[in-house]
Amino acid sequence: STASEPLVLSEKSSSGKVIILRLNRPKALNALSSPLFDQLNIELEKADADESVGAIVLTGSDKAFAAGADIKEMKDKDFATTYKNNFLGTWTRIGAIRKPIIGAVSGFALGGGCELAMSLDMLLCTPGATFGQPEITLGIIPGAGGTQRLTGLIGKPRAMEMVLANRKIDGKTAEAWGLVSRCVAEGEDVVAEAVKIGDRIAGYGAVAVQAGKEAVNGSLELPLEQGLRLERRLFQSLFATKDQKEGMSAFAEKRKPVWSHL
Ligand code: CO8
């Protein structure tokens, strides 16, 4: 990409309710440089604040979702400066996005690219997708969820093989192992499929959607008893929303609900 071309492209779906963000460093296979990640955070936060948007789709190119953190940028770094400047620490900002983010992975999702994908709320991929954590080949280990989220998703023996032996897996295997919710058929448009899910989500009440995301994420962070309490409290609090009144009245009156997102 040229210097003037944005590192992250943003467009609205035809319904206008889904934002599609596209990583755009094609010559570097979308290697996640600091400027690219800063731009991604800005675009995600913009989409999160846009009242007309119900869900976000994040994708890359056909060849690469992202081939990892930028190795050329990292190569000469030392501990003191990475620590003082919190190198790659801004990656956690994605965890504060309240709207659902659906990843659509084609091609390489390696290292930080695989970790970025796993930090999203739902993942679709193509049969030709390649997931891997090749950090061991560089003399390091994953640093943004590649040992923690991966293990939770696919289990310890498979995670160990990917992290320690650089085992790479294709899209069908990623589906079989539970890394993605669906591997689309050969030739099917993975971004279009992700947008369909986004449009479905955008058709529901935004407050309940946000609460559902918060509650599911709570299960990854909290012991069961606290997670169940969070879920119950969020559930109870939704009885203070207009959308709960509307949703249940519409059911009783056998009509479609009209959400106010309030
Ligand atoms: N960083 C920088 N540049 C890259 C990267 C990368 N991760 N991946 C590819 N590129 C560049 C190549 O250098 C090349 O540039 P140039 O044309 O200037 O030489 C261009 O993209 C095209 O790549 P290739 O010519 O290598 O393309 P191939 O189709 O032959 O190979 C591969 C594709 C197999 C994906 C290969 O490029 C590759 O192995 N890339 C590196 C994959 C990798 O090791 N990723 C892990 C990086 S480490 C990491 O992600 C740690 C994250 C820690 C996060 C911590 C947060 C706190």
Image (cartoon, helix red, strand yellow):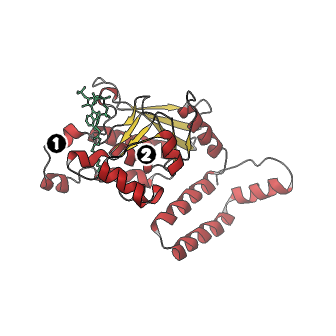
Point out residue 249 in the picture as x, y percentages from the top left corner: 81, 57
Please name whichever residue, 196 or 134, is drawn nearer the observer in this view of the structure. 134
Does label 1 or label 2 sit earlier along the sequence?
Answer: 1
Q: Point out which mark residue 75 bears.
A: 1
Quarter of the render that holds ligand 1 = top left
Going by the image, does 29 lie left or right of 204?
left
Image quadrant containing the C terminus: bottom right
User: According to the image, label 2 marks what residue?
Assistant: 117
Residue type pointed to by label 2? Ala
Q: Residues within 10 Å of mark 2 (few under 14, many from 20)?
A: many
Going by the image, does 41 lie left or right of 53?
left
Q: Residues within 10 Å of mark 1 (few under 14, many from 20)?
A: few
Point out residue 18 in the picture as x, y percentages from the top left corner: 56, 38
How many numbered marks, from 0 up? 2
Residue type pointed to by label 1? Lys
The answer to the question of whether label 1 and label 2 lie on touching residues, with beta carbons closer than 8 A, is: no
Please name whichever residue, 195 or 48, is drawn nearer the observer in this view of the structure. 195
- Per the image, label 2 sits on a secondary structure element best described as helix
Residue drawn at x 52%, y 37% as measured from the top left: 19
Question: Which image quadrant is residue 40 in?
Answer: top left
Q: Point out which mark residue 66 bears.
A: none
